[in-house]
Image (tube, rainbow, N blue to C red):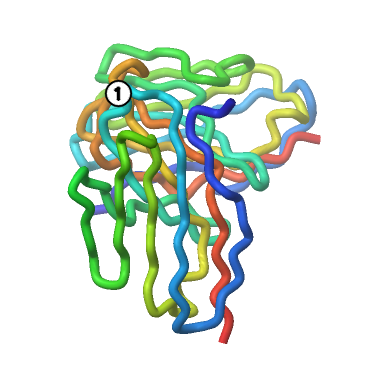
Amino acid sequence: NAGVTQTPKFQVLKTGQSMTLQCAQDMNHNSMYWYRQDPGMGLRLIYYSASEGTTDKGEVPNGYNVSRLNKREFSLRLESAAPSQTSVYFCASSIGLAGPTQYFGPGTRLLVL
Amino acid sequence: RKEVEQDPGPFNVPEGATVAFNCTYSNSASQSFFWYRQDCRKEPKLLMSVYSSGNEDGRFTAQLNRASQYISLLIRDSKLSDSATYLCVVNSETNAGKSTFGDGTTLTVKP
């Protein structure tokens, strides 16, 4: 039982490049989330998917797009990376939108030069 | 004002000490409350839920005060392994049930 997995673990991009962060969960959870965490700060919600087939914006969606590919997978795409998107990105899942518990992946560390 | 506020610390305490963290929330419609633990460069993990009557899990005690809109976490007999950042998390019906995370309180337990 792997829980929540994310790929890649690390990535360096140049300004303007694009990339997709992958996330998958094997707990049969309905809801999935993408957060970013900047140094010394808490988690900020980028996008979430309450259930398969739905996605909604969170607190900081600008510069990102998401796809809920199926119940297991939720990807995050940066179309044109900017230095301000340098951060650690966490994917999480929960049984339903109200949790109660969110399970997090190990994170993707992204550096945009 | 942030929806969930925590004292960032850092809290530096000796082994065996008792330490308490507070967290205030601004949305009176908040429904459920949690403490997560995040080790350095790792993902957050649920430490414990916070119930209205207060709850205890070993050396950890969580309290909720709805009237004053704060929750607390008390750690007794601190261990070196308790060193981490503790995140306060609040779910609100008015936020479609989504979680709002505090910025975290950093604890370092020293020998």
- Residue B64's place in the image compared with A94, above or below, is below
Rendered residue at 27%/47% (across/down): B50
Is residue A94 depicted above or below B110 in this figure? above
The correct choice, above or below, for B79 with respect to B36 in the image is below
Q: Residue at x 56, y 34 (%)?
A: A36
The residue furthest front is: B67
Q: Position of residue A75 (x, y in %)?
A: 44, 26
Q: Position of residue A46 (x, y in %)?
A: 51, 24
Q: Residues within 10 Å of mark 1 (few under 14, many from 20)?
A: some
Residue at 45%, 42% in the rendered image: A6
Which picture quadrant has residue B107?
bottom right
Instruction: Look at 58% across and 81% down and name the residue there.
Output: B110
Q: Amino acid at mark 1?
A: Gly
Q: Residue B97: x and y, percent?
A: 30, 23
For residue A53, what is the image quadrant? Answer: top left
Which quarter of the image is occupied by the C terminus of chain B?
Answer: bottom right
The number of discs equals 1
Q: x, y percentage for residue A72?
A: 28, 31
In the displayed structure image, the side of residue B1 where residue A23 appears, left or right = left
Residue closest to the eye, A12 or A56: A56
- The secondary element bearing badge 1 is classed as loop
Is residue B86 toward the left or the right of residue B110 in the image?
A: left
Q: Chain of mark 1?
A: B
Compared to A55, does B63 lie above or below?
below
Q: Quadrant of residue B66?
A: top left
Please give left or right for residue A48 compared with residue A83 in the image.
Answer: left
Question: Between A75 and A48, which is closer to the camera in this rendering?
Answer: A48
- On the image, numbered disc 1 is attached to which residue? B97
The N terminus of chain B - image quarter: top right
